[in-house]
Amino acid sequence: MTPKGDKGKEGDSSFAKKKSRRPKYSRFSQQELPACKPILSPGWVVSIFITIGIVFIPIGFAALFASERVVELQFQYDQDCVPAKYKDNAVAYIQSNATDKTCTRKMPAVTSKMKSPIYVYYQIDHYFQNHRRYVKSRSDDQLRSVAKENSTSDCAPERFAKNGQPIVPCGLVAWSLFNDTYKFSVKNKTIAVSKKDITWKSDREKKFSSSVYPKNFQSGGLIGGAKLNSSIPLSQQEDLIVWMRTAAMPSFRKLYGRIEVDLDAHDEITIELQNNYNTYSFKGSKSVILSTASWIGGKNDLMGIAYLTIGGMCLFLAICFILMYVLKPRPLGDTSYLSWNRNASGGRLNF
Amino acid sequence: MSGEHPLLSSPDSPSKPLVPPSSLAERLEQLCLDESSSSSVLDGIDDGQGESLLAREYTAVPDCGVKPGKQFFPVERECRPQFPLEYPTRHKKRQVSWGTMELHSINSNPASHDVPQAPSRVLEKANKSQGSHHKGIQFEDNLLHEDNPRLIYIDDPKKTNDKYEFTGNEIRTSKYTLITFLPKNVFIQFHRVAYLYFLAIAVLNQLPPLAVFGRTVSLFPLLFVLCVTAIKDGYEDWRRHRSDRNENNRESLILQSGQFQPKKWKNIQVGEVLKIRADDTIPCDIVLLGTSDPSGIAYIQTMNLDGESNLKTRYARQETSSAVVSAVADGCAIMGIIRCEQPNRNIYEFTANMEFNGHRFPLTQSNIVLRGCQLKNTEWIIGVVVYAGQETKAMLNSAASPSKRSKLEGYMNRETLWLSIFLFVMCSVVAAGMGTWLIRHKYQVDTLPYYRKRFFTNWGKLNGKTYKYYGIPMEIFFSFLSSVIVFQIMIPIALYISIELVRLGQSYFMIEDRHMFDCSSGSRFQCRSLNINEDLGQIRYIFSDKTGTLTENKMAFRRASIYGRDYGSRVLVADQLQEENNTGEGLARKRWKLKSEVAVDYELMELLHKDLSEDERIAAHEFFLTLAACNTVVPIVSTSTSSSCAKGDVDSIDYQGESPDEQALVTAASGYRYTLFERTSGHIAIDVNGEKLRLDVLGLHEFDSVRKRMSVVIRFPNNTIKVLVKGADTSMLSILANDSERDDELRHSTQSHLSEYSSHGLRTLVIAARDLTNEELEQWQSMYEDASTSLTDRSLKLRQTAALIESNLKLLGATAIEDRLQDGVPEAIESLRQAGIKVWVLTGDKQETAISIGVSCKLLTADMQQIIINGTSEAECRNLLVNAMEKYGVQSSNKRNQSSKCKSNAASDYLELRDDAKTSNVPKWHEAKEEGKISAPLALIIDGNSLVYILEKDLQSELFDLATSCSVVVCCRVAPLQKAGIVDLIKTRTDDMTLAIGDGANDVSMIQMADVGVGICGQEGRQAVMASDFAMGQFRFLKRLLLVHGHWNYQRIGYLILYNFYRNAVFVLMLFWYILSTAFSTTSALTDWSSVFYSLIYTSIPTIIVGVLDKDLSHKTLLQYPKLYGAGHRQEAYNPNLFWITMLDTLWQSLVLFYVPQFTYKESTIDIWSMGSLWTIAVVILVNVHLAMDIHRWVFITHIAVWGSIIITYACVVILDSIPVYPNYWTFYHLACSPTYWITILLIIVVALLPRFVYKVVHHIFWPSDIQIAREGEILSRKHKHLGSEKDEDSG
């Protein structure tokens, strides 16, 4: 703090020295910068609440409206698609290579017209894709470039194949790739499900290289999920890319594909699915969802409800405070409220 | 520091307390014990570096005579008779057994000084000056033996340094060198527990099973903090290096091969002889051998050492003086040996003896000149170095004051403990969850796709082995540790740095405050301690020194009563008068220019121009002669060549003396043309109205505290002999002649004048004189001769001698001197008292003066009940205390401690009572209440002697009870250590903050003892300032310092701490909730860098800016309503309740942060990194808006900081998401495209802050704090001024 002062002192004459010792005036150093000093005056309080109400209620309505327009069909099939004789031993059913995994069911009827694009999701519950062991069990380096295919240090136990070669893509995430497949048909007419561009562009271009091909994948003693066609580069393995964008919560949806045709109301959709993925060992459930989208995403009434509630609450508070100010006003800056002036008559402050 | 009690008193000064040696020793020991018990307190807060110095301080205390008293007196008494005193053998014996056979040495020593050996002498206690002299010698030799004295061979540095390793004169105040900087600095930094904690966490994170964060990332916070601190320390040390270098390379003249040659200071060695010229600084502690003055006198200024600006005299021993001077002139070698005590930091004592030319004589304090002093008015001195470099007393004293820790920081640590408990609970929950989850999924985890603990490779030895799995107990343990790593910032590391930076900023504003700049001395405010800024906002007790702190320590002659007439109501400035007279009276008169102007009374001046015929005229003449002659002031005349008025030569005179009162009197006499301009030991010369009058001084009886007067016997040129006396009224009025009616009349009128003067707070002295007859003179002379050469009972004999002539005196008049109060002192004290601060005055002055000053600075008022405690024994003190307590109904502490409410009640009662005197325009709404109270406020006046008994014995609690229930406490005649004792009394018994303010060396102990020490710098010097935490030029700045800066600092730091706790806890809790939904696996959705940057970059700048710049109230309001300071007393800005409320709020906000995205992204495809990105942004915006809600004052910098840090966060997120290496690549771009993201954030912010806002508003409406009301008043009134009426706007 003092060096400045010292420097100034050295060169000057004694008079100037004395003068320079005095702190120079600036609005900053004297803490007198022009300032805005908000106080919680009744006007401010009430207008803040009203503003929040005015902003929130329309947003709430918009969100609710958008959510209402989304048509969503959900079909949980994990129990439904286990044959009766395996009901008690679903794990054995799903692990066996001999059993027929095909399952054809009718989806719930379309409630109202679904405009394309209709998104096909699969949803798994109780699947901790956010488990630390799982999230870390991958090698982004390996996915990004051929040269780094050996950087598999985080990938154990899916790290090396029998010959000591690295597994590409390594790690638990890739190993446990979801492998149920869905085919939809309406009135016996198959509806095409496009699996193109269901991933983020950035993932396809930067994170999953077009020159890295699957190698030694699912070659270990335990098959975790889907196998990959080793002639297709990773950047085009969109199911894998979707899967590897690990979900935030233990109950999650992932995009399976897109249906590019409209579905009319009351259409009956038949789904033919291959129930391959083992969620039975941890009592996870699986569903398939057809849904249209809106600006707030999928069907989600909660957002709109929350906005409406908060908006309404703020308006209510605004009214409360108005009443409070009217019924029991406290003049601002009234010195008679000062702690040492209570119970005594006081005048206004003279500033 | 009154005139009668100079601090640097030589051992034979008459003002030593009249205590028998043994009891003195005991008492000192008591004090020392006291001190050492309090030292443990100091050690506790010491950061370690001051410890050794402290230890040295306390070990140095016994040097003042404790050990000899306890251990050696008995030995001496027993042994002395058994050993014959043989002078011739002494030398031989010493050579053989020096330092090894103590008994021999002890017994041979008494022979060495030619003092009659009376066995009873040790027990003699009546005499004072002589007694203390003896004692000095006695102790000294004992000490020398005990402490293994250093032997110094004069002018033989080789031999001197041969045996003992004496330090060179190079000083080093810096802590580090280039090589030691890194290890030492890191070592010192890791003394902070918090740093060790973070180091441990960083180390933990390096272990493979726990690697939660990337390895480099986890080191970043600690490294950042270490680097910032290291840079700061390094810079400070570099500055110290620079000043050391300058100091070490100065040069002095050293006797080298027979000639004085310049040598650099750092090369000076102990034992060398050096020569110092006038105005030079002394490079090391030297014993005077000779001076340019034949009588061996040297004047030095000790400003740098003890802060006293007046000159002090030091003597070379007569034995050495002439011999050395001639030896040096002839180029002969100087031979001699000095034995002195080991280096210590007591600047008021020096015990040594010297052997020179076969004689052996003692050396005392008056023979040594210390490093840092300046030689004045003496052409040169020659001395021998006894202590050099680090061992000089100045260096030993320049130890940094023990570092203090602010109270708020103590509280902060308490709450940090709570946070650690939360942390522990959270980690335990995670660990327990992990355990139960693993047990429940025991049979699944082998194959569970998201856990899979085993290899299933079908090949190799790894097949079937577990992977990263260490069994359930270990997994639980690791889970605990890794959650500690994730939640580490629950203990806010950034807070430590933030607080330091904020304090730095606050100090900047305190230093730059123009209202605290003292124009008269050109001294700025100084922050010497950066740790306790916020303590300024919570002070409850102020302990103030009087002289130089409340007063200017510039005595001014105000009034005079001469021959029964009062003068001084009509005054003229001397200069004007001189001008007037000079024009009329010609130019021949030599004029004297004084350093300070004197106001003279015109009437009196006229009287003095009359002929010497009337009685009144003669009385006035003698009156002023007494003023000019009866003192010990040394006039220093310097002819000023460049005077503006060229008529005649104008000599300026500077009066130097140890008593400012005497200086004032002499100056006043000079104003009335009785100018003292020459003083030698034999005569004085006075210029009376142009005539030079040479007066022979036949004898001088110095002031002592028994007689309370001083007299001088002078012979006039016409051979008349007069005794001139001045003294305290109590001691003078009884020895006046009472012959005629006129005398009686005179006495009555003078007495009434005296009482009038002292009621104005003036210090009074009575002046009297009488002629001596020849017989009287002869009788006196023979007695005086006898007494002054006597070696036993000298002071007693001198007193008897004085009594002989100090009788039957003719009253001349009385003087009244004003120790002017500093500007604004009464107002400042008034404000401080309104603010609920108790002001205690601790002074070395006598009771009457202390009370009169108390009255003049409005500390004591007429309506107060004064309780005066001045007992001379323990029992008396006890009685006085108990009686006073009974009389005024003071409860004992046991009763009061039951509820602390009583105390606050007392405080508020006191506040009510004081209001009537208020000068501001606040209406008197409290009158009713005041009438309800029966007893008047109490004032306690207690003197040092009583304090000795009270502080030592178990009367402390009584004193405490009484003192705390008094609104004013004045302690007079207190010693420096007692000042500290009183501060300690309050400090140990209450939680209240204490502040000590003082200007002199005698205040140092008190300044260091108090929670906050303030030094007054100005004309007086450095000692107090060196020991202080804050230093300023004037007492009145204290008002601004406490009421304005203290308030601001307290509010700011209090909020800063709470906010930092909140800021980190909300983040950690958010992570915690998430971990609960990841099967307790300590996953963090946020990227590593975001987690690290959160508290260091994303959110730290606004807190610092707000901590430095935010102001709840303007300084005008704070000064106008001192009671607003009570917010600090009530701990409004930081208290446990606030902490818990904040934590509840934090809990709510973290839940909102976690759950709102849960709902808005329910059943969506959101991935972990997008969620993390959302949370990063949301939490940063949330905490910044939270801060924004609490900011009182938005300046553009605040805007930049708050909104800027949100922008910076966005920028950082964008940058981090643009690096393909990270898994979160492109996340943000993707998120930002969806409106859901934005409205989610909006929802989070509003929902999270709504309860807080509502709470704030409701609180504001129904339970407004004083600060809020004052703030409204302040802001609205400004609006009124600027906009006229705006009432409609607000009534929405």
Image (spheres, grey):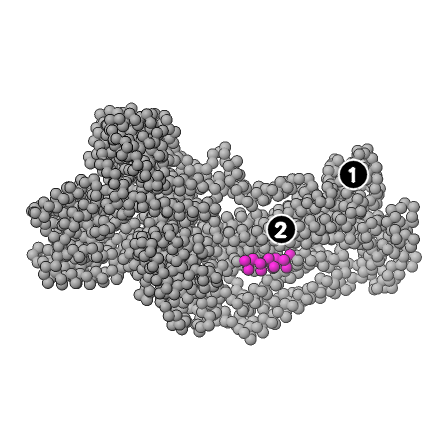
Instruction: Give the vertical position of B1217 relative to B891 (above or below).
Output: above
Of A171 and B803, the residue lying toward us = B803
For disc 2, the neighbor class at 10 Å (few under 14, some 14 to 19, many from 20) is many
Disc with the residue nearer the chain's start (1 vs 2):
2
Of B962 and B388, the residue lying toward us = B962
Q: Work out which quarter of the rendered image holds the C terminus of chain A and state it.
A: bottom left
Look at 85% across and 62% down and name the residue there. A110
Instruction: Report the residue marked by disc 1.
Output: B465
- Name the chain under label 1: B
Give the distance between the C-alpha atoms of the residues marked 1 and 2, in whole angstroms.
34 Å
Q: Amino acid at mark 1?
A: Lys
For disc 1, the neighbor class at 10 Å (few under 14, some 14 to 19, many from 20) is some
Where is residue A317, by image quadrant?
bottom right
Q: Residues in magenta?
A: B1136-1150
Instruction: Report the residue marked by disc 2.
Output: B423
Residue B16 point in image, percent of width and height: 27, 46
Check disc 1 and report its element: helix, strand or loop: loop
Where is residue B199, by image quadrant?
top right
Q: What predominant SS class does the magenta segment belong to?
A: helix
User: Could one spot residue B417 in this view of the protein?
Assistant: yes
